[in-house]
Amino acid sequence: MKKTVDVNAVTLEKEKNNFIKASKATYYFIEICRGIFAAFLILISIMIIGNFLGFFFKLFDFGNNSQRIVEMFVGGIYLLSYFIPLGFAAKIFDKFRKGQTPFQYDVADKIKGAAISMIVLNVVSQILGWVYAALINNNVFTGEMEIITVTNEIDIDTILYGILIYAFSYVFSYGAKLQQESDETL
C-alpha cells in the first residue's frame, strides 16, 4: 500500500522548517565534534613535535620517544579519519540549515568525498597500526609504554559505513537530477 501525503503550502512549509531546525542542530553538533577533534589533533601534533625534538636533540628525557612518536602519529591519522568526513558533513548541513534543497549535485559530491575519505583514512590508519604492531612484536621498540592498542582485526564497520554513505551519494545525485528536471518543467 502506497503512503500518500497531503501536500499543500502549509504542510510543505512546516516540513521545510522542521528540516531546517534539524539541520541546524546537526550542523552545530558536528561543529562541536570537529572542534574537539581539532583540539586533540593540535595536542597530538604538539606532542609529536616535542617528542621528535626530544628524540633527536635529547632536550628532554621522555623515555622511549620513537615509540611515542609512532603511537601518536597512528592516533592522529585515526582522528583524521573522523575529522575530515565531519568537515564534509558540516558543509552539507550548512547548506541545509540555510534552507537549500538537499538534492543538489554539490551535496552528492560532498557525500562521496566524506565516504571516500572515511574509507581511505580508516584503511591507512589500520595499515599504520599493523606496521606499528609488527615493530612492537619484532622488539624494534623497547619499553613498557603503549598509548594505543593495535589488533590484527580490520575495522570493517567504518569501511561498511563508508560504502553505504557512498551508495547514498547516488541517491542524492539522482534526486538532484529529478530536482533539475522539476525546476526546468516549471
Image (cartoon, helix red, strand yellow):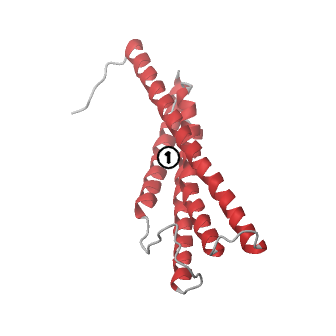
Q: Position of residue 130 (x, y in %)?
A: 52, 75
Q: Position of residue 29 (x, y in %)?
A: 50, 37
Q: Quick one: SS at disc 1? A: helix
Taking depth in this image into account, of 83 and 85 the one nearest to the observer is 83
Kindly indicate the quadrant of the structure image that contains residue 32.
top right
Residue sitting at the far top: 10
Residue sitting at the far right: 57
| Category of crowding for the residue at label 1, using alpha-carbon neighbours closer than 10 angstroms: few (below 14), some (14–19), many (at least 20) | many
Residue sitting at the far bottom: 138
Q: Residue 103, can we see it?
A: no
Read off the residue under disc 1: 169
Q: Position of residue 84 (x, y in %)?
A: 59, 50
Taking depth in this image into account, of 87 and 29 the one nearest to the observer is 29
Q: Residue at the spot x=53%, y=73% of the render? A: 145
Q: Amino acid at mark 1?
A: Ser
Q: Residue at the spot x=47%, y=55% of the render? A: 162
| Vertical arrangement, residue 62 with respect to residue 165, above or below | below
Kindly indicate the quadrant of the structure image that contains residue 128.
bottom right
Q: Residue 71, can we see it?
A: yes
Question: From the image, which quarter does the N terminus lie in?
Answer: top left
Q: Residue at the spot x=28%, y=25% of the render? A: 4
